[in-house]
Image: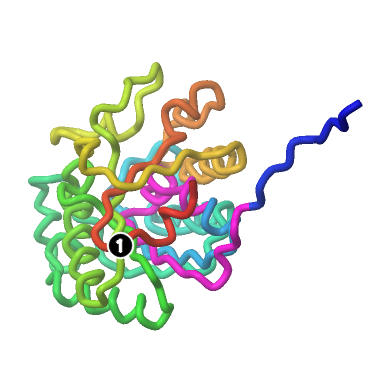
Amino acid sequence: MAAVLAPVRTPQPSLTGRTVVVLHAHPDDEAIFTAAAMHRLAARGARVVLVTATAGELGPVLRPLRAGESLAARRRRELERACETLAVARLVLLGHRDSGMAGWDDNAHPDALAAAPTAAVARRLADLCAREGAEALVHYDPQGIYGHPDHLAVHRAGAAAAGLLGITGYEATVDRRRPRTRRPHLVDQAAGARVGWEPAGIATVVRADRDDLRAKRRAMAAHATQVPRAATRRVGFAAAYGTEWFRRIGPAAVLDELS
Ligand SMILES: [Zn+2]
């Protein structure tokens, strides 16, 4: 009688010693667009450094703030909780002001990210990536996924910084041809611009496993002032948020080793 062997899961190679810097515009973007990839990277041993460019002080307020509490302070705490969930090794806040939606006067505020000189932001990012020994920088596609002025600024600075160092740039996006699910992705509720990118231009796709999904739900739920409760219900979550998409500028790097 032949022995029956239990299926053996091939262990995935460790990513210990590898570093990725992940740049986002506002607290919550890391959870919505890249949490599965960040969680998987950390679970495999990579060092994930999250850089959040603004405090998100012009976002909605879905939960009441405490007396005297600012939205920026609350969102920082939400971000720190999300970082714990995603095992982020280091959080860096660039301290720019939220620029608000396209056309708002806030776009031109002297501290607004959208008004900051791209070269200066890129230099700061490049220095950070160099000190961290990062092999890749994650930022946004050329239309900022959905056209928000701060997201466009993240693309400009991220692309310039990756270019300065000659490291791979991964541009977070969404596949605009993806099948529509019963629960719309939050990005589909964003005002105005056409969202995402054509699939032919998307090089790297990360599909969340069960642990990644659980972490992503928790990370999104941590941003309770921004993310409606309905968006993080378990049923339907995997279909709406279980895939993350990246354009890639440069050679294949650590995100391409996640599948
Ligand atoms: Zn954002």
Give whichever of 55, 174 is nearer the camera: 174
Q: How many marks?
A: 1
Give whichever of 70, 96 is nearer the camera: 96
The residue at which mark 1 appears reads as: 251
Location of residue 4 in the rendering, given as x and y in whole percent from the top left corner: 84, 30
Residue placed farthest to the top in the image? 182
Location of residue 42 in the rendering, given as x and y in whole percent from the top left corner: 56, 59
Give whichever of 147, 164 is nearer the camera: 164
Quadrant holding the N terminus: top right
Q: Is residue 149 left or right of residue 80?
A: left
Q: Amino acid at mark 1?
A: Pro
Start-end of magenta stretch: 12-39
* Residue ID at (14%, 55%): 106
Tell me the element at label 1.
Answer: loop
The answer to whether residue 68 is seen in the rendering is: no
* Residue ID at (12%, 64%): 115
Location of residue 226 in the rendering, given as x and y in whole percent from the top left corner: 39, 41
* Residue ID at (12%, 71%): 117
Q: Is residue 164 left or right of residue 224?
A: left
Location of residue 101 in the rendering, given as x and y in whole percent from the top left corner: 17, 45
Residue placed farthest to the front in the image? 1
- The quarter holding residue 94 reads bottom left
Q: Is residue 133 magenta?
A: no
Q: Is residue 176 left or right of residue 186?
A: left
Q: Is residue 89 above or below residue 197?
A: below
* Residue ID at (47%, 54%): 257
Q: Is residue 127 above or below residue 141?
A: below
Q: Is residue 29 magenta?
A: yes
The answer to whether residue 190 is seen in the rendering is: yes
Q: Is residue 40 above or below residue 125?
A: above
Display coloring: rainbow
